[in-house]
Image (tube, rainbow, N blue to C red):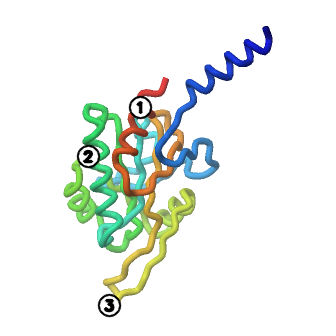
Amino acid sequence: MRLLLVAAVLALAACTETSFHNTDITGSPFGSDFSLSDLSGHRRSLADFRGKAVVLFFGYTYCPDVCPTTLLELKQALAELGADSGRVQVLFVTLDPARDKPKLLAEYLAGFDPGFIGLYGDEQATGKVAKDFKVFFQKVPGKTPDSYTIDHTSASYVFDPQGRLRLFVRPGNPSDLSADLHTLLHAG
């Protein structure tokens, strides 16, 4: 009888285990929070978005490829969510505070989705948040002092509506992200 009870409990646990398309990093000891300014100058942290799934992406407006591609994929993933998209907040943290001033960030993000929120800090604050999330970034000199690029981690992080870090998402499959967001939004 005991063996039957254990088998039933294990079967039930297997049925309720959440499976994601992207990398499950639930319980990771990094990336627990941030404190940066939004485009209105208000300090924002993860707690400000409690009740929503949050997609956090680090990039910069002069990025020639990965950033615009990722932002388009995020827009597509939200479109696939339909009505649930209102329960997701995309946050874009600039890795280039020297050039990405609030007005430029606002114009850039509005070109993808007016609901995306830009976040910025000075170099020290940006470096701290990037380090907390294990995001690599490094300035690459260009032909002129202002024509540099920034090599950076191209993945996004996803938090569930309770504010827990859950997923590491590489660019390339917005439908998988949409499915994972749906799972997080409808988890019991």
Q: Position of residue 177 (x, y in %)?
A: 39, 45
Residue at horizontal 56 percent and vertical 25 percent from the top: 16
Between 84 and 30, the one lying in front of the other is 84
The residue located at (24%, 61%) in the rendering is 108
> How many residues crowd around disc 2 within 10 Å: few (fewer than 14), some, or many (20 or more)?
some
Up-down: is 55 above or below 132?
above
Q: Does residue 67 sit above or below 164 in this rendering?
A: below
The residue sitting at 47% across, 65% down in the picture is: 153
Q: Amino acid at mark 2?
A: Gly
Q: Which residue is mark 1?
A: 185
Q: CA distance from mark 1 to mark 3?
A: 46 Å
Residue type at mark 3?
A: Thr
The N terminus sits in image quarter: top right
Please tell me in which quadrant of the rendered image residue 182 appears. Answer: top left
Q: Which mark is residue 113?
A: none
**Mark 2: which secondary structure?**
loop
Disc 3 target residue: 144
